Image (cartoon, grey):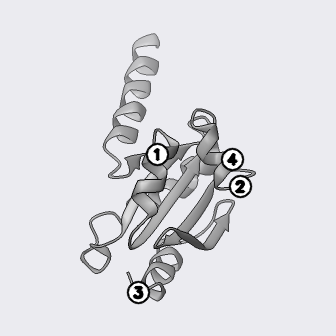
Amino acid sequence: MLLTVLIGCSKDQERAVNSGLQDINSLDEYTTEIADGVSLLFFHATWCPLCAAQRPAIEGLVGDAALSNVFFGQVNYEQITDVVSTAKVQGFPTIVFYKNGAEVARFSGQGHSQDKIKNKLLELGQ
């Protein structure tokens, strides 16, 4: 049973690494990545089931040809607190949309479909 748990954990870690979302690890990196064009940042906690439920809708958009100019990033809510504070994120999951460094939309909580997120990105003229 322990082996099953360890295998399950390593697959979860691998999935997070291979999600296609770039990890934001500092305030400088955050500022640089959102500065130009359209960006989507996914604020999450690794243990949060609501975040896990929302993640596939976001990951499903990474690599979409219609969104090739969008930067897709993720911020660990508990580890990168200066970015969380700067972005004024108060809970998770939260999806924040930026255009040329300015926040233009925000979806809080889970349940936002892949189509809804894609339509918002297309609306921003990525």
Q: CA distance from mark 4 to mark 2?
A: 5 Å
Q: Quadrant of residue 61?
A: bottom left
Res. 125 mark: 3
Circle 4 or circle 3, nearest the eye: 4
Circle 1 or circle 2, nearest the eye: 1
Q: Relative to residue 21, is residue 101 depicted above or below?
A: below
User: Is label 1 in contact with label 4 (beta carbons under 8 Å)?
Assistant: no
Residues packed near mark 1 inside 10 Å, few (<14), some (14 to 19) or many (20 plus): few
Res. 28 mark: 1
Badge 1 element:
helix
Q: Earlier in the sequence, mark 1 or mark 4?
A: 1
Badge 3 element:
loop
Q: Residue flagged by tag 3: what amino acid is it?
A: Gly
Q: CA distance from mark 2 to mark 3?
A: 24 Å
Circle 1 or circle 3, nearest the eye: 1
Of residues 1 and 39, the one drawn nearer to the viewer in this rendering: 39
Q: Relative to residue 45, is residue 67 depicted above or below?
A: below
Res. 88 mark: 2
Q: Which residue is mark 4?
A: 85
Instruction: Tell me where residue 89 appears, x and y as whole percent.
Output: 69, 53
